[in-house]
Amino acid sequence: MNVTKISIYQFFTLMTLFLLGSSIVLGLNLEAEENAWIINTGAASTGVLLFFFYVYLLKRNGWPEFHKLLELAFGKVIGKIVLLLYSLYFLYIAIRVLKDFVYFIAQTFFYNIDHWIIVLVSVYLICYAAILGLEAMARTSEILFVFTMLLIALIFFFSFMSGVTMRENVRPLIDLEILDLSNWVQYITFPYGEMVVFLVLFPFLNDHQKLIKYGWISIVFSGALLISITQLIIAILGAKVASLYTYPLVKSLEMIEVLGIIQHLELLTAFAFIIVGFVKVSIFFISAAKGISYMLPIFQDKFIIFLLGGIALVSSFIIAKDLPQHIYIGLELVPTYLHVPFQFILPLLILLLTWMKGMKKQRKGVKKGV
């Protein structure tokens, strides 16, 4: 994977598409009903704070590549073990998002197609993207970003043109009686906590000062889009009904009809999900492959990529037996037992260890000077 520098705009498009991910189709925190916008606003605000935390973690250590950052914090041996764990974590999340994609396509559009066909084609495209590298992925994201924004704009335009949206459905805007923050771990870990994967990518930006100044805009922008899409779903279906559907945006668009001609706009969600799902899985996959390639330098990058592709292909059939189990694992188990350690605990530990080692060096320097 020949990685070179990427621009701040390419980062903006990558981050935006990454954060939209499967959230654009599944709907974000619709179980909060009318309070969904409050939860999503709080989650996006937390995402901005997480972004600055991850950026600070790299900045204070001189913008090292991820494997060097881990070695700086834990030492070479333990650092490689942590790198392996992170690589497996990135690969697992990539497989989970891929599984989201498979279920969506199979249950929404192609009812009779075998899952293995969708998985095989998807894994092939993801491996191809990984072979081309991050720079090619970043350039591609510029084009895919324009298509995605156009699709989202069309969704909103035809939704309002058809008259299926109802203001009454989004009221009351705040319902304190049903406001439940017990799922706060899920709210802050998906999708914003998943930005931890960008610890691998941040060092490759060509201007880190612009990242610090403008990088947060992508989180605010994608957060605003997710809030708007969630409110649109509620305006069409109603809060209680929307929370019952696995793919509420698809159900919302099925109700749209303009002049008896324009209908079946749920196809737009398929195109949008294909784009954002591809970008998100590719970023996780490329990051996992980079970690494994560093640990196994004797193997060529292509071998590592196809090896991980094979693992992803097989694992996609065994991580969950059906959609309900897949959703249960993703919403109930993964946030607590995987996301929290890798998104919060380990980064905080890295910050603490690098800070302590930095203080030791300063003390030694002072002693030598004396």
Image (tube, rainbow, N blue to C red):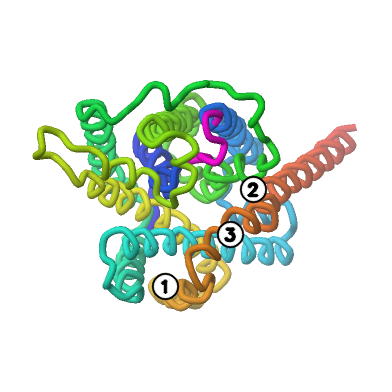
Q: CA distance from mark 3 to mark 1?
A: 25 Å
Asked which secondary structure carries label 2, the reply is helix
Q: Within the magenta stretch, is there residue 30?
A: yes
Q: Residue at x 55, y 41 (%)?
A: 31
Asked which secondary structure carries label 3, the reply is helix
Q: Dividing the image into 4 quarters, which one contains the N terminus?
A: bottom left
Q: Is residue 93 left or right of residue 105?
A: right
> Taken as a whole, is the magenta stretch helix, strand or loop?
helix
For mark 3, what is the residue?
328
Task: Give the answer, above or below, for where 345 lies relative to 328.
Answer: above
Q: Is residue 289 left or right of residue 126?
A: right
Q: CA distance from mark 3 to mark 2?
A: 20 Å
Q: CA distance from mark 2 to mark 1?
A: 24 Å
**Of the residues under marks 3 and 2, which one precedes in the sequence?**
3
Q: Residue at x 56, y 29 (%)?
A: 35
Q: Residue at x 49, y 69 (%)?
A: 322
* Nearer to us in this view, 351 or 110: 110
| Three-letter code, disc 2 | Gln
| Three-letter code, disc 1 | Gly
Number of other residues with Cα within 10 Å of mark 3, as a class: few under 14, some 14 to 19, many 20 or more: few
Q: Position of residue 308 (x, y in %)?
A: 46, 72
Q: Is residue 156 visible?
A: yes
Quadrant in the picture for residue 19: top left
Number of other residues with Cα within 10 Å of mark 2, as a class: few under 14, some 14 to 19, many 20 or more: many
* Nearer to us in this view, 177 or 119: 177
Asked which secondary structure carries label 1, the reply is helix
- Mark drawn on residue 343: 2
The magenta region covers 28-35
Task: Give the answer, above or below, for where 341 lies relative to 113.
Answer: above
